[in-house]
Amino acid sequence: MKVKCVLCDKIEQIDDESLQAKRLKNRRINMYLCVACTERIAKKTNERHATGKFKLYQEEKDNNEFI
């Protein structure tokens, strides 16, 4: 299966039977990122985490004792 990276427009070949290929076929909203882009994003995210100014906003859940 031929796939195209969303960020750098690099075309790669992945195995048709792989889990990633099946996800891309069944859920078209999923995007493919090449290995280089994935590593670059992970590196930049880790650098932002290290600055201490990076916050993850998580939804507060109500603890209902009856549920």
Image (cartoon, rainbow, N blue to C red):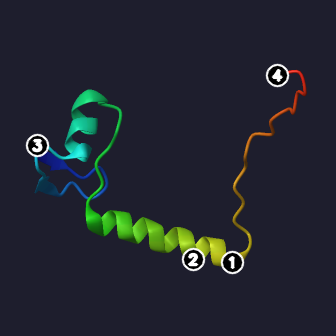
Tell us which disc is closer to us: 4 or 3: 4
* Residue carrying label 2: 47
Pick whichever, 34 or 10, lies toward us.
Answer: 34
Q: Is residue 34 left or right of residue 30?
A: left
Inter-mark Cα distance, 2 to 4: 40 Å
Q: Please tell me the numbered disc located at residue 67.
A: 4
* Residue carrying label 1: 51
Q: Is residue 54 left or right of residue 42?
A: right
> Which mark sits nearer the N-terminus, 2 or 4?
2
Pick whichever, 10 or 13, lies toward us.
Answer: 13
Query: What crowding class fits label 1: few (fewer than 14 Cα within 10 Å), some (14-19), or many (20 or more)?
Result: few
Query: What crowding class fits label 4: few (fewer than 14 Cα within 10 Å), some (14-19), or many (20 or more)?
Result: few
Inter-mark Cα distance, 1 to 3: 40 Å
Check disc 3 and give the amino acid type: Asp
Residue extending furthest toward the top: 66
Secondary structure of residue under mark 2: helix
Residue appearing at x 47%, y 74% in the figure:
43
Residue 28 % position (x, y):
29, 30
> Which mark sits nearer the N-terminus, 1 or 3?
3
Residue 30 % position (x, y):
34, 38
Q: Is residue 64 left or right of residue 55?
A: right
Query: Which image quadrant for residue 56?
Result: bottom right
* Residue carrying label 3: 16
